[in-house]
Every structure is written in C-alpha cells, then in structure tokens.
Amino acid sequence: MPNDVAWPEKLREFHNHHFDSTIWNDFPFRNDDIVISTYAKSGTTWLQQIIAQLLFPGCEGMEVAEMSPWMDLRIPPKEVKLPEVEAQTHRRFMKTHLPVDALVYSPLAKYIYIGRDGRDVVWSMYNHHANANDIWYGALNDTPGRVGPPIEKPVDDVRLYFQEWLENDGYPWWPYWENIHSWWEIRQLPNVLFLHFADMKADMGREMRRVAGFLDISIDEEKWPQMMEYCSFQYMKANATKSVPLGGAFWDAGAEVFIHKGQNGRWRDILAAEDSRAYEDRAQKELGAECAHWLANGGITN
C-alpha cells in the first residue's frame, strides 16, 4: 500500500442493542483480512457466500455464518468472539455494519462496501424484524452490555415502518445516512471496493470477478459453474441454515425468512408518491447528487 495515504482514524465508539464497536480496538489484523461492510440488508450475506466460494471454489455445505462473523455485533461478547476469530486459519472475511469513523481502519485489510437503495433496505429489514422471535429479542435486549433502549416489536404496517425509519434516521436500527456517506468519502482508497446490490443482481458473474480481482484471487474456471450455482439466490434460499446466524434460530419460520426474496422495488406499490419524494429529497440533502444517484441506481464507482 502507498505510504502517503491519509488513512481513516477512529473517532468514536458506537453502542446500541446490536453494537459494541470496541471489539475493533483489540482486533489484531492480518495482512490478507477481508472486511465486508454494509448498512445492513444490502447484500451482506450474499457477498459472504461469494467470498467463501472464491476462497474455497466449488465447496458445498460451508458454514459461512460461522466462517464470517459479524464482528461488532455484541453477541457473543468480544471476550468470546476475538479468540474464535484469531483461531481461524483460512483467509478471514468478516462483516461490519459500522460507519468508518467507528472502526479501527487497517491498511492491511481489504474493505468491500455494498450499497442498496434505502427503500429496498427497509423492506428487507421489516421482514427480518417482523418475523423475529422471542429468542432474538432476548438476545438483543436482555443479555449484559446493552447500551440505550431495547429494540421493540415493529408496527404492523410496512409503510408506517418506513416513515418512522426515514423520519428518525434509521429507527429502530441505527443511522443510515452517516453510514453511506462515511464509506462514500473513502471510496477511492486503494484497499476499498464499492459494489451495489442492483449491479450484483444484474450480472453476478461480472461482480464476482471484480471481487476476485480486488482480492487477488485467481478464478478456478473449471469450478466456475458450481461457484455461480452456489452463490445463486435459489441455492442460498434452499440452504439458508448455512448462511444465517445460529441456523435461523432467531426466526420461528426458519433461516429461509432471513434470505427472503432478494428483490428490489417491492416498495413501489405501497409507498405513496410523497413518501418516495421525501426519501429522495433526504438522500440528496444528506449525500449529495452523485452519491444519491449511485445509491438509487448502482454503477461502478472505483
């Protein structure tokens, strides 16, 4: 990596019912680590599956959720999680949902950020939230270490859920705009790759090859058809217990609820025109025209 790069610095900690950002303070990076970053519900699990296939071409039945932990999720606590990740012998690929300034950012690692239109994000999050069971609420709300209020059950109306999320910047999860903006600001760093959910949907093979090139991984062309199959939505839905934390125990309907539809635009028939205008106006205000356009439409940025 270049020596004259102004690398991001950690400026704050971030805590809530999900997060404990302090785990990064004690995390020893390796020089080939991979960090997958998203706001959430933007293709994180999909990219974890893709990277698993790039590292282990054509391998079926991998426990990807265990191989690729959510580092800043406060469950299990860092005293448990850090030794588990340190013991991993394969090339590590972890995920985070933090904004850049709440991370310890390492020049040793490679970072892949995935964006998705916030309206699509909310539709996916609502399904995730509305189907969560008492085990999920107990883990997030009742285990030691929670900072701030608990996460409550959602309203029984996805449009109202979206309006609350927009008006209160990510409620009841975490702030949306600062996450997008913080990563957009560092997109030109030499160890950052930007992806977009819409681009992955349009041409998964192309995006997989972009990821492989960024990570300096050679494609095994003989196994490429298997790799494509194992990264397809249909395969992941049918084998969701391998990709979802605790095999889907947090949802009574099982892991398949977590990997729900993989579609964009489901909000179009439900949101009123004024709802979408409010979202689009907010995106322009918070992100600027270029980033807001990318977030809504995708397109290769680096």
Image (cartoon, rainbow, N blue to C red):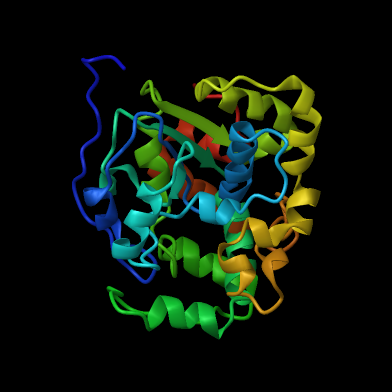
Image point (55%, 51%), residue name: 118
Residue 30: percent from left, percent from top:
34, 34
Image point (36%, 80%), residue name: 143
- Left or right of 109? Residue 104 is left
Q: Quadrant of the N terminus?
A: top left
Q: Visible in this render: residue 152?
A: no
- Residue closer to the observer: 37 or 300: 37
Residue 239: percent from left, percent from top:
74, 57
Image point (28%, 38%), residue name: 105
- Residue closer to the observer: 184 or 244: 244
Residue 151: percent from left, percent from top:
43, 77
Tell me if residue 250 comes above or below residue 124 in the rendering.
below
- Residue closer to the observer: 269 or 63: 63
Q: Visible in this render: residue 186?
A: yes
- Total numbered badges shown on the rendered structure: 0
- Left or right of 99? Residue 271 is right
- Residue closer to the observer: 259 or 247: 247
Residue 110: percent from left, percent from top:
41, 30
Quadrant of residue 148 in the image? Answer: bottom left
